[in-house]
Image (tube, coloured by chain):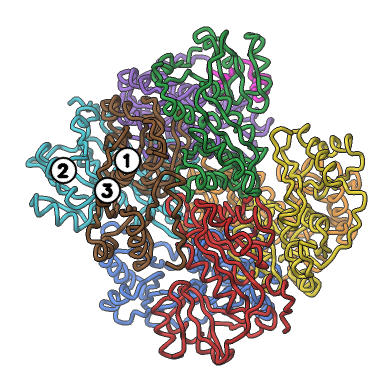
Chain colours: A purple, B brown, C green, D cyan, E red, F yellow, G blue, H orange
C-alpha cells in the first residue's frame, strides 16, 4: 500500500464513498485495498471483478459477495439496510446489455437510489419500449444502455421528459468498433436530454443517476 | 469528349439509362456530355448540379429543368409521360434531410417507380413515424434518409416488413463526422432488413429501390 | 428467462420467425432460449454458435444440428420440407469468405429461398466471375461476399442488373482494419445497385435477399 | 411549410417548447418557421443563427433580437418576465469557449433557470477554478465547456459534488480533430459525475442542465 | 532564396532533375525558384500550379507553359526534343481521375518515357478495361488511377503481368474520406503486383513508372 | 475441394505460379490444396504457415520444408536449382522486421531473383545504412522493411536511385496502430521512388520486386 | 474584458510572460487584450496573427511589428535588448515548414534564447542534415520541424545527443491527414530523445526549448 | 547473432549505452544479445521483459535481476554504485499507471539521475497533486504518467515551471482507444511546457528526462 493514495476525504467532498475498479489490479494489491477500505469504512464496493478476485477477497473477508452478471464484488457493512429513495429507470436494448445495466442498477442501489429495471426493449420491436413509457417517465432520471447501433437512447429521448444518461456498450461486432459506433449514435442524438458516458461504464451512469435522483428527492449530501 | 468512354450499352445491360454526376465536372465538358446524351437518348438526367451548371446547359438545351432542392438537372424527352408503377416509400428523419430524399424520389420516378413521400418523422417525436406505419408498409420497399445519429432506419426496421435502403446524410455537426456516424448506426442496426448506401447518396438509393420495385411488380428489364 | 423479452409477434409483423444470435450468450441462458422457442415454434435457428454451444443444446434437444462452416445451430421442425422458391445468387471472392457466405445461404434457405452458390471467383482472376455471369444474372438478387479490398461487389455491379447485397468480411490482415476497408470499398462503389450490411453479417444479407426474392416471386408474407 | 412536421405536442410531452436550429436552413423556410411558431407560441427561440438570418427574420418580426456571441436569434414574447429559479453553473476553460457557453447559458435562462457564469478558468492556471469552487458547488448542476484537451471537466469532477454536463468545443487546432480530442478526454474522465454532449452543443447542455435544475427545485413539468 | 537548400546534386544522385511542388508556395518565392532553376538547368518542371502562379512565372520567363488539366507549369528548354523510350500505360477509372493521370503521364514524358493513355475504363463497365487488355499488357509498367472505391487496380492486377503503381484519388464523396477509402482498397488488394502511392500523387507514380521503364529499356541513369 | 476455384492459368497469364496463403486455412482444406498443387505443378510454396500446418503437410508430403523465421512452408520440386538472376536489395530497420523481410527474400528467390540482404540498419544509427549505400544502389530494386515510425524508406529514397517497395510492419506498440503509422509514413514520404504494400506483406513485396528485376534483366515472362 | 481572466501571476509562477494566441479572436477583444497587456507589461507578444489583426493593433499601438512568415504580432518594449543566452537548434525538413519553425525561433528569442537556424535539410537529401551535424549537436536542445512523413526527427535522433522537441506540421496532402501522419511518425520514432508537441505548434516548441536551454545555462527563473 | 547490427558506437555518440527492448524477441536471440552485451559492457539493461525471459537469462547470467512491476530485466555490473545526480520528478495519475512510471524511474536511475516519485495523485482528487507542488517544482524536469483521459499533464503544466515529459498510458477502457485518447489530451494541452512520448513509453521518458537533467546539472556526456 506504499503507492496508493487512498482518498479519505472523498465521501465528505462528494457525498459518495470510494469505490474499487478491480479490473487489471494486481492480486495482492487488490486484497490490501479491500481490507484497508473495510477497516476504514465498514463496507467495500468494487466493479469489474473476476471470479478469481472474488475468491481472493473472500479468503480474507468471508462475507464478501459476488454477482456474476454485473461482476460487482461487495463486502456489505453490518447494517446495509438503508431505505432506497426516489426512482431511477434503467433500460436496455437487448439481453446482452444486461451486465452493464446491472452494474448501473446495483451501483445506484448501493448509493441509496431505488431502481426500476426495464430490460430488453430495443427498437427492433419498438412496441416493447412504448408499452413501458409511463413506467420510465415516472422515474427521476433514465439510464439507457445499448450496444450495436445504440438507437434506444434517441427513442427514449423522444418519449420521456426526464434527463437520460446514455451508456453505449461494446455489444455487437464488425463496424461496431467495440462500442464507438453506439457512442457516436448517442452523442449525435437528434433527441434532447441525452448525455453520454464511456462505453460499458455502468458504474458511471449509476453514479450520475444517483446525483440527479438525490437532487430530485431533496436529499442533500450532508444528510 | 476525347477522354470520356460513354457507356452506350448500359441500358441494354442493366435496364437503366446512363445518368450524369454533375458535381465537379468541368463546364465545357458537362455541356458536351449533356448534348451528346440528348442526341443519343432524347433525354438526360443529372444529379448534384449547381444553378450555374443549369444556366450553362439551358443555353444549349433550352428545355432543361432544374430542381433546386434535389439539385437534379434534367432535360426531359419529348414524351416522358411513362406511367409510374409499384410503390416506394421515401422517409426522412428531419427537414434538412429532404434534399437527399428528393434526389432519391425524383430518381426513382425518373426510372418509372411511384413514390410515397413521408418526410420529417424522426425519432425525437416517435409518434410521427408510428402514425405513418401503414402508409410505409404498403410500399414494396423503403428508402430511409437520416443524418445526425440516423436512428430512423432502426425504428423503421422494427415496424415494417419490407427491405429498407438506408441513406445516411451529412446533416449534423461535431461528432457526426460528416455523416460517418449515421452510416455506422445504420450498418450496425439491431433491426433486420436494412442495407446501406454512401452518405448523401440519394441517387443510389432511388436506383436500388427501383430495382426492387420492378422485381415486385413483375416488370422485367427486357420489357 | 426473467429478463428476455421474447418477441412473440415478430413473425406476424415481419414475415420472419425469431432467430437466435448465439455469440456471447451465457450457457444456461442460451439453452433456455432454444427450449422456449422450440416449444413455441416447433423449430429454432441460431447463428454464430460454437461447438460447445451445440453440445449444450443437443443435450436438451437431441435433434439439434450444427454446421461447422457457417456455425449455424439449428433444431429443425418435424416437417421442414418447404419448397424453396425464387433464386438468390451468393457469390464469394475467396475460399476464406465461404463461412460468411454459407451463413447467408443457409439463412436464405431456412427462410424459403432457393440459392445458387458461386464461390471463389474473386477479381484477381477476373475470368472466373465473367464465366458465371449468366448464372448470377438469372437470380432475383445477389449476395456478394468479399474481404481484403472487397472489389468483387463493384465488378458484379458492372455486369448484372439485379440488386446486390454486399457483405464485407474480416478476411485479410494489416490495413484491412478487421473488414472496415472492404466495407468502405463497397459503400463507395462506382457501380450502381449495391447496398451494404455489417462486416461478416451473412445472416442479415440472407434475410434481405429473401425479402427481395419474395417480392420477386410474388409471395406475400401473409401467405 | 409542406414538408415540416412541426411538433405541436412537444411542450406537453417534454415540458420544453420547440426550438429552431437555424444553421443551414433555407432563407424562406427559416422565416416561415419563425412566423408559424410566433403565431402559435407567442415567442420563438433559435440557435446557430447568422447576422443575415437575423436581418431576414427582423424584416418580418420586428422585435426579433440577435446575440452575436451565442448566435441566438430570439423573438421574445410580450411578457417574458418569468422568474428564474434554481442555479446552474456554466464554466469555461478559455475565452474562445464563451460562444458555446453563452448558448448554454441563454438556453437555460430561456427555459427558466438561473445561471452563474464562471468563464476563463482553465487548468493552465488552476488557481482560477479553485478560487471559484464554492460558487460552482452551490449550483444544482454544472455545465463544463472546454476545447483543446478539455481537462476542465475532470478537474471540476474532482472538486464539486454536483452532476457535470461536459461540452467539448472545437476550439484548438491540429490534433484537436475538430473537438473529437476534447470529447474523448471528457468521455474517459477518471473523475465521477461527468456525462458528455456533442461538440459545441451548448443548447443541449443548457437543456439537460434545466431538466436537472427543475428536478432540484421541485418544479414538475406539469406546473 | 536564403532558406531554400536547392539540391544541386539530385540529378547526378538519382538520374532525375529537381521538380517544383508549386502548391502553397509563396508568390515571390515561387518565381525566384523558377528563375534560379531555369538559369541552372535550362528548363523547369513544376506540379500543382495555379493559373495565378502561371501568370507570375510567365511575366518573368515568357516561354512558360501551363496545362490546366494536369496543372503542370513548365518552362521548356531550348531543345526538349528527347526521344521517348519504352512504354508506360496510364489507366483511369473515370473522367474525374484524368487530372491526376495527366500529372503522371506528363511527368513520365518529361522524364523520357513513352506513355499509352487508357482513360475512363472503370469497373462499372468492365468490358471497357477488358477490351484494352493487350494495350495495357504491352507496357513495361502500369499506372492505375482511381477514386471512389478504387477497384480498378485489383481488376488490372488480375489481367496483366506487369508491375502496377496504384494512385488513389480524392474523387468521390461521403465515406470516400478524401481518398483514404481508395487507398485502403489498393493496399489490401487480393491481386498481386500492386504497390501504392499517396492520394492524388500523379507525379510520384510517373516518377516510379519511369524508374521501372528505364530498367526495362536498359537505359542506365549515367547515360 | 468443392469450393476452391484453383487458378490453373495463372502462371501463363502472369508468369508466376500460384502461391498458398496458409493463415486461417482449415486443416484438411490446407492439406488438400498442397496435395493438389503438388500433383499439378511438382512444387508448392506457401506463406504464413504455422508449425502445426507444417506437421500436417509433412505427413502427406514428406519433403515439405518449413522456415520458422519467415513462416514459409515449401514443398520443393525435384529440381529447383534454377539460376537466380538480377539483384534485389532487401533492407530492414530492425531485427524485429526480419521475419517480414525473409518472407520477401525467400519469395523473390523462389521466383528466380538474386537477393542481397541488408538487415538491421535503421535510422536511429544512420551510419549503418549509409555504409551499405553502394551495396543497395547496385540492386535493380529495393525492398524496404520497417515498423515503428518506418522512416527507413524515406532515408533510402534520398540515397539510392532505384525503385523502392516499402513494406510497413506491425512491429512497435501504442500509437503504431498495428502498422498503420508506418504505412502512413511511407505513403507520405517526401522522397521520390517509393511505393507501398500492405502491413507485413513481405510476399507482395518479393513479387513486385521480382517483376521489376525481371524487366531489368530482360527476362520476359514468355521465356 | 469582462470575461477574460488575465493571468497576472503567470510570469512569477512559470518564469514566462503571458502570450496572446491571436487566431480566431474577435477584433475588438484582441485589441483590448493587446492594450491591457502593454499597459501592464510594457510589451506584448502574440502568435498566429493575420495582416488584418496587425492593422487593428497598430492603429492603437503604433510601434506594433508584424512578421508575415511566422505570423507573430509583437509590440516590443522600450528596451528589449536582452542578451540572448545558450543555444537552440531549429531544424526544418523543407521550405514549407519554415513558418512553423520561425514561430519557434522567434518565440525562443523572445524568451531570451539564442537560436541556430538549420532549414530545408530534409531526408530526401540526407547529406544536407549530415553536413550540419556538428552545428546541431552544439546546441543545448533541438527543435525538429517536419511535415509530410516527418522522418527528420528520427534521423536527428540517430545523430545528435541532445533532447529533440519534434513539431509535426500540416505540410503535405492526401494521407498526411492534416499533420496526423507526421505526428504519428514522431511519436513512434525508433530513435531516443524525441518528444512531440501538437501539429504546427511552433510556439510550444520554442517555449519548451527555452525551458531546457535555461536549465543548461544555469539561469534560474528567479533571475 | 548474424542479423543483429549491434550499435557499438552508441554510447560514444549519444552518451547512453544500448538498451534491450525484450518484448517479442525470440528466446535464443534474446539470451544471445544479453550475453554479447554483458561481455562487451559489463552490464545489461532491458525493458518489457517477461518472467519467462528472466528465467532464460538468469540461467546464463546468474546475477540477472527482474522487477515485476516495471518489467525491467537487468544484469548489473560489478560496481554499479554511481552517485545519482540532479532530480527528476515522476508523477502518476493512478496506481494502474505505476508500471509505466517505474519503467521511467528505473531507467532514469540506471542512466544516473536521482528520481522523486509522486504516485497516485490524479485530478479526480486534485488536492493530492497540489499538496506535492513544491516537491515536483524542485525537480529539473517532470515525467507525467497518466491513462484514461490523461488530464494530469495539463494540471501539472499549470502549476510547475519545469519541462514536462508526458507519457500517456493504455490504462482505461472503451473510448480510451488503448491510450490514444490520453495521447490526444496531452498533445492538445492548453498548458505550456508539455511534450509527449508514445503510449506506455516509460523508457523513452526516462531517457529524455535524463538528457534534460544532465544539462541542468552541467554534466556533459564527455565526462
Total labels drawn: 3
Q: Are marks 1 and 2 on the same chain?
A: no
Q: Residues within 10 Å of mark 1 (few under 14, many from 20)?
A: some
Circle 1/circle 2 CB separation < 8 Å: no
Q: Tag 3 or tag 2, which sits nearer the N-term? A: 2
Q: Chain of mark 2?
A: D
Question: Can the viewer see residue H135 in this picture?
Answer: no
Distance of mark 1 from mark 2, alpha carbons?
43 Å
Residue bearing mark 2: D44
Q: Is residue G162 left or right of residue D189?
A: right
Residue bearing mark 3: D103
Q: Is residue C136 left or right of residue D99?
A: right
Residue bearing mark 1: B112
Span colored in magenta = A51-77
Q: Quadrant for the C terminus of chain D, please.
A: top left
Quadrant of residue C223 in the image? top left
Observer-nearest residue: F112 or A56? F112
Observer-nearest residue: B189 or C15? C15
Amino acid at each position: 500500500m506504499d503507492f496508493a493514495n487512498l482518498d479519505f476525504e472523498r465521501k465528505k467532498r462528494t457525498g459518495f464513498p470510494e469505490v474499487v475498479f478491480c479490473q487489471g489490479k494486481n492480486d495482492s494489491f487488490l486484497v490490501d485495498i479491500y481490507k484497508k477500505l473495510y477497516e476504514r469504512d465498514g463496507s467495500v464496493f468494487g466493479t469489474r471483478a473476476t471470479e478469481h478476485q472474488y475468491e481472493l477477497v473472500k479468503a480474507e473477508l468471508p462475507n464478501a459477495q459476488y454477482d456474476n452478471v454485473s461482476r460487482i464484488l461487495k463486502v456489505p457493512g453490518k447494517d446495509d439496510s438503508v431505505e432506497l429513495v426516489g426512482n431511477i429507470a434503467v433500460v436496455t436494448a437487448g439481453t446482452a446489455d444486461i451486465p452493464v445495466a446491472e452494474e448501473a442498477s446495483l451501483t445506484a442501489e448501493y448509493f441509496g437510489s431505488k431502481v426500476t429495471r426495464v430490460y430488453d426493449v430495443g427498437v427492433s420491436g419498438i412496441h416493447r419500449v412504448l408499452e413501458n413509457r409511463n413506467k420510465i417517465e415516472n422515474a427521476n432520471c433514465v439510464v439507457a444502455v445499448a450496444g450495436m447501433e445504440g438507437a434506444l437512447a434517441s427513442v427514449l429521448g423522444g418519449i420521456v421528459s426526464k434527463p437520460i444518461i446514455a451508456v453505449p456498450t461494446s455489444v455487437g461486432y464488425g463496424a461496431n468498433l467495440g462500442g464507438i459506433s453506439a457512442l457516436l449514435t448517442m452523442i449525435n442524438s437528434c433527441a434532447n436530454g441525452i448525455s453520454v458516458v464511456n462505453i460499458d461504464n455502468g458504474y458511471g451512469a449509476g453514479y450520475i443517476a444517483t446525483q440527479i435522483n438525490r437532487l430530485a428527492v431533496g436529499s442533500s449530501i450532508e444528510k
